[in-house]
Structure formats: C-alpha cells, structure tokens
Image (cartoon, helix red, strand yellow):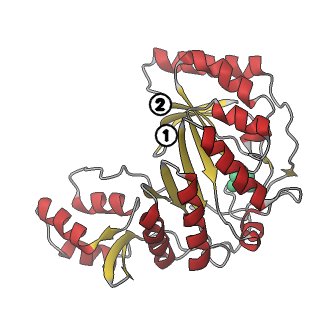
Amino acid sequence: MKAFGPVPSRRLGQSLGINNIPPKVCTYSCVYCQIGKTQHLNCERRAFFHPDDLAREVTEKVNELRKRQTKIDYLSFVPDGEPTLDINLGEHIERLKPLNIKIAVITNGSLITIEDVRADLQKADLVSLKLDAINRKAWLKTDRPHKSLDMNSILQGMLEFRANFSGELITETMLLKGKNDSVEEIRRIAKFLTSLRPEKSYIAIPTRPPAVKGVTPASDHVLNQAYQIFKETLPHVEYLIGAGGSEFGFSGNVEEDLLSITSVHPMREDAVKQYLEKAGADWRVITNLIKVGSLVELEYQGEKFYLKKLPGKF
Ligand code: SF4
C-alpha cells in the first residue's frame, strides 16, 4: 500500500501518508527507530515504485476520501525508511501537485548534500529535517549512519537547502539518555538550528519500543532544560512525544487540558496559576496530578515548570 490514512498529526493536521520506499531501507539505523531495525543500510538513490503507479494509487485514495468529504491537509512522504533514497521523489511530487493538496516530506536529511536531493525537496511545501546531534560521536551513537556519510557535509547541505527553500521548514530532534542529551550537545544543536531558521523545532523522545533494547528517552529534567535552551534563540519550540492533544486544546476538563498543554511544552508556575484561575479551579488539581504520577514539577534557573510525565523506559 503506497498511500495510508489519513492520520491525525500535530505537525501536519490530517495527513495522508505516502510510502515511497519499501520497509526499512534507510541511510541511518537509529537506535531509537520505532519501525524496527534497518535491514538495508544504503546511501544510493534508486527507483522503487513507478511514478505512474504511485500517482494513480494516491489519486484514487484522494478521490475516495473527497467523495466521503474527508479533509486532507497534507500528502506526506513518510515511509518506513528514508524518502530521499527514492530517485523519483521529485517526479512523484510534481505528479501529485494537480491534486491541490500541500505536500510534505519527512526526511533524516542525510542525503541533502546531493544537489538533486535538494532540488527534489525544494518542490515540497513542507520539509521536516532530523537533527539529533552535532558532535560526531553523539551522531554515530544515536543515528548509526552509513559509513559513507559525513556529519559536517550534512550540516552544510542543510544550510544550503535552507537558503533557497521558500516552503515551511521544521526540524525534529530526538533526545536519548546518555547518547545526545548533554547540555553541551543540546546547546550545539540549538546554535545550529538558530542558523538554519526553521519555522518550528520539535523536541522528541521515543514513545514506542525502539530498535535497540535498553535505549531510554532523555529525562524529564533534560527535556525541560532542552526546551528552555532552544527557546532562548528559536522562535517556535514544541515537544513531539506522541501524547496527542492539541496545543491549548480546551475540552472543559481542566486536568485533561493541562496534560494536553504540558505534553507540548512545559508550563511555568505563573502560567499554570493563571490557567487554573480562568478555569475556576485551584492548585489541588496540580497536587493531585503530581500525586498520581501524571505531571512532574521541575526547576530551571530558579523557576518552577510543570511537564506531563513522559515514558521513562520500555
Ligand atoms: S532515519 Fe528514520 S527510518 Fe531511518 S533508522 Fe532513523 S528513525 Fe528509522
């Protein structure tokens, strides 16, 4: 199946997924990969599906959904592997443009050093780049790249791409305990992202069992710290932790709404107080959420923050 969904996504709204790569053909073998171990670690671009077949299947799916009046916000290349390994990516995008739906590509960015890959990505309306590390050792430990890849060239390629890309650029950084979660590394990532100028920077942790046993998400403390460091220089920072819920969603249930907000970003104590006051509730809501283990209280530079309790291990 080359088209699946639509699936609700916080980044992309109602997203119709497109699988343009057979499962687990990737340039990385990330220790946290949530779709299993990479079976074909590869850096050579090639054709996987014929553009006619892919366009036909996606068009049929879109027509069917339109008949049922189902909203589609994005057609998203988000395969179980690295989408830019597909030499036809640019052509697929061209073929889908007449459907008049925005097109997104979720890529690890490792092939962005190749001019043709940058040209293909330029055709998309939204590109999401992965940036888990700047330090080479941290990159090797976290993403386990193909041996022909070079970190500095990838960073340079990302900047070159950004300089000519007029669509929306977002980034995703997965933080893992003991791999890429030191304060120094987080600062290096934030510094690079600042020069990349993404519209949004997401901080993620694995929420499903990772490819390698024993891989653990960064701690709540580190996640809060990372958010605060990113926020110093980046305009829009959010968590991406698969917890669902819309930003500042309001269901009328104070506890649910607070957990929904704090799964997107930590809330400072004064913001929580204001929120409770508006909702006609008091601090007992927070005490109770902490007591049952749904919320955690953390300190950063002398201020208290509240964050939804995230999965600690698998
Ligand atoms: S880049 Fe994505 S698909 Fe490839 S190994 Fe990493 S997480 Fe899995």
Q: Is residue 121 visible?
A: yes
| Contact between labelled residues 1 and 2, with CB atoms less than 8 Å apart | yes
> What residue occupies the far bottom of the structure in this picture?
302
Tell me the quarter of the image containing the C terminus: bottom right
Left or right of 256 in this view: 27: right
Q: Is residue 61 left or right of residue 228?
A: right
Disc 1 residue type (three-letter) = Leu
- In the displayed structure, 290 sits above or below 271; it is below
**Quadrant assignment, res 106:** top right
Residue at the location (59% across, 78% down)? 184
Name which residue lies at 13% across and 60% down. 278
In which quadrant will I find the N terminus?
top right
> In the figure, 90 relative to 35: above or below?
above
Query: Helix or strand or loop: what does disc 2 sit on?
Result: loop
**Where is residue 289 shown, x and y percent of the image?**
30, 73
Crowding around mark 2 (Cα neighbors within 10 Å: few <14, some 14 to 19, many 20+) is: some
Which amino acid is tagged 2?
A: Asp
Which residue is disc 1 drawn over? 12
Circle 1: element type: loop
Point out which mark residue 73 bears: 2
Work out whether 142 lies above or below 163: below
Q: Earlier in the sequence, mark 2 or mark 1?
A: 1
Q: Say which residue appears at 81% left-offset and 59% top-offset.
A: 150
Which numbered circle lies on residue 141?
Answer: none
Question: Could you tell me residue 24's position as x and y percent?
Answer: 78, 48
